[in-house]
Image (cartoon, rainbow, N blue to C red):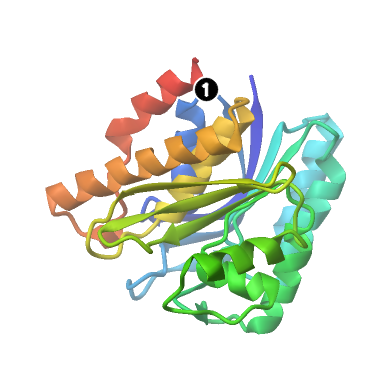
Amino acid sequence: MKRIFAVNDMSGIGKCSLTAAIPIISAAGMECNPIPTAVLSTHTGNIEGYTFRDLTDDIIPYIRHWEKIGVKPDTIYSGYLGSKKQIDSVIEIIKTFKSDNTLVIVDPAMADSGEMYKGFDTSFADDMRKLCELADVITPNITEAAFLTGQSYRENYDTEYIDLLLNSIKELTSGFAVITGISDIPGKTGCLVYDIKSDVKKYFSTPKCGGIYYGTGDIFTSVLAAMMTKGKTGFESAEIALDFTYKSILETFNEGTDPRLGVAFEKYLYLLSKEGQK
């Protein structure tokens, strides 16, 4: 059985981070070994009064125990990291466990809509860049891609600007870059997948549902990580991940449930089970 180390926080409510990664990776037929960076009662998006327990100091002793018992991952996948020390911890995880056959996927979750997340400044992008340089696959949104490459963010972007970001990303990784949240076609949103080694890029899109849906980035990258670990190409994996995420959002939209509580991905987990068996 394939094994994925998933480094992220865990929110009890919100269907994001590890709460999404564990069932998604498991449904695809792989073992998900969580490395929690923090435990929260809920995610932090538009919800007040959440509890928060920082586990930064536990990460290295945690993985040293895994090293001692000889556990080895097929994939190391990191999501939201709340500090430079957590980034340094993930770098140490990669140095400890990565072999020639280990896939490293980094979701550099730190910014959106032209701004860094609360509590981060632009120097955080410099630290995140060091982690991305060790990755085989990175999944930034447009804002994160701009900060990582030192480009100015453009709210109204075009194909020429996306190409500029892709050319700059070559300095970060020689593998795959998946830029998410591209909405340059009216009524559509999607991702652009760039295989840097072969210089091939493909755009995948779905209809766009109105509103903000929390946890969708974690869902997308978790599916991507699972499918690539199974041996599917970056292009195949991104298309499956985008379709799964869209179905989950649409289900939530049709139900009319509070999007702060996460999207309804559970009823579509069987699709990942089928893909994992192909």
Which residue extends farthest top?
Answer: 278
Q: In the visual, does 146 lie left or right of 64?
A: left
**Nearer the observer, 1 or 137:** 137
- Residue at position x 45%, y 38% in the image: 239
With respect to residue 117, does 160 lie above or below?
above
Which residue extends farthest front?
Answer: 160
The amino acid marked with disc number 1 is Gly
**Nearer the observer, 239 or 132:** 239
Give the x, y percent position of residue 144.
Answer: 57, 69
Q: In the visual, does 52 lie left or right of 71?
A: left
With respect to residue 218, does 73 lie above or below?
above
Image quadrant in which you'd find residue 242 = top left
Q: Give the quadrant of the N terminus.
A: top right
- Residue at position x 59%, y 38% in the image: 234
Asked whether residue 143 appears in the rendered view, the answer is: yes
Give the x, y percent position of residue 75.
Answer: 69, 37
Residue tagged 1: 29
**Nearer the observer, 82 or 77:** 77
Give the x, y percent position of residue 34.
Answer: 60, 43
Image quadrant in which you'd find residue 76 = top right
- Residue at position x 43%, y 61% in the image: 182
With respect to residue 92, does 126 lie above or below?
below
Dot 1: element? loop
